[in-house]
Every structure is written in C-alpha cells, then in structure tokens.
Image (cartoon, rainbow, N blue to C red):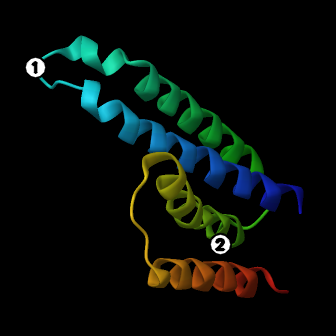
Amino acid sequence: MKAVIIGFVCAFLGSVAQILFKLSTPEISFSNIQSFLNKYLVLGFVLYGIAFLLYLYALKSVNVSILYSTISMSYVFVLIFSRAFLGEKTYYWNYIGALLIVLGISLIMKR
C-alpha cells in the first residue's frame, strides 16, 4: 500500500511540474539558452526528478502494472490544476473522462 501511495505522490509531483513547465514558456527563447534557467522550468525539473526517484523506490515493492496505473492520476491532477492555476477552459466531458480514469485505477487495483 505504501508503494501505491508513493505512485499517487509521483503523479501529483509530475502534474505540478507540468503546470510549472507551462508557466515557464513565456520566458523561454530557443535562441537564448540562458532563458531555460527560469525559476518555473528549473523547479519543474526538480519536481520531476523527485518523482522519478520516488517511483524507482516504489518499484522495489510492487508490480509495475499496479504502480504505473497510479501515474495516470496525473491526467486528473493536470485537469484540475490547469483550470485552477492557468484558467484553462474545461468541459463536463473532461470530468467524465477523469472519473473514468479514477474508476479504471480502482478496477486495476482491486485484488
């Protein structure tokens, strides 16, 4: 169970990293390599790195087929975070899809 919780934490951290990556894009210029050192992008990479290390740790004690399904929660988290922090428009079918993801994870984890 501990490994599955770590999987959800990895999904959460990866989702926050995605929002940070999006926030970093106005500052990025492909003609200026130094623009890639902006705070949002660097913090996003740090969170991805932490999520990666936690994921490796969790893999030691649970099947990859179970653990990886928890990573799909990142779709749900990004849906919520993009609306809350980026003001992106969402529709009812987005939430239906998120509900199906949660249902799917529940079915995969049922033993």
Q: Give left or right: position of 92 versus 37.
A: right
Distance from the alpha carbon under mark 2 to that under mark 1: 41 Å
Inspect the image, locate mark 2, and give the three-letter code of the amino acid beneath it.
Ser
Q: Quadrant of residue 103?
A: bottom right
Mark with earlier residue (2, 1): 1
Q: Is residue 61 visible?
A: no
Q: From this view, report whether residue 14 is shown above or below residue 71.
A: above
Residue 79: % across, % down: 51, 63
What residue does disc 1 label?
Answer: 31
What's the residue at 43%, 77% (across, down)?
91
Residue 67: % across, % down: 70, 64
What residue does disc 2 label?
Answer: 65
Residue 17: % across, % down: 51, 40
Q: Label 1: how many residues lie within 10 Å, few (<14), some (14-19) or many (20+)?
A: few
Q: Quadrant of the C terminus?
A: bottom right
In depth, the one of 49 and 96 nearer the eye is 96
What's the residue at 67%, 66% (across, down)?
70
Q: From this view, report whether residue 78 is shown above or below residue 55.
A: below
Q: Label 2: how many residues lie within 10 Å, few (<14), some (14-19) or many (20+)?
A: few
Residue 93: % across, % down: 46, 84
Q: Is residue 12 visible?
A: yes
Q: Quadrant of the N terminus?
A: bottom right
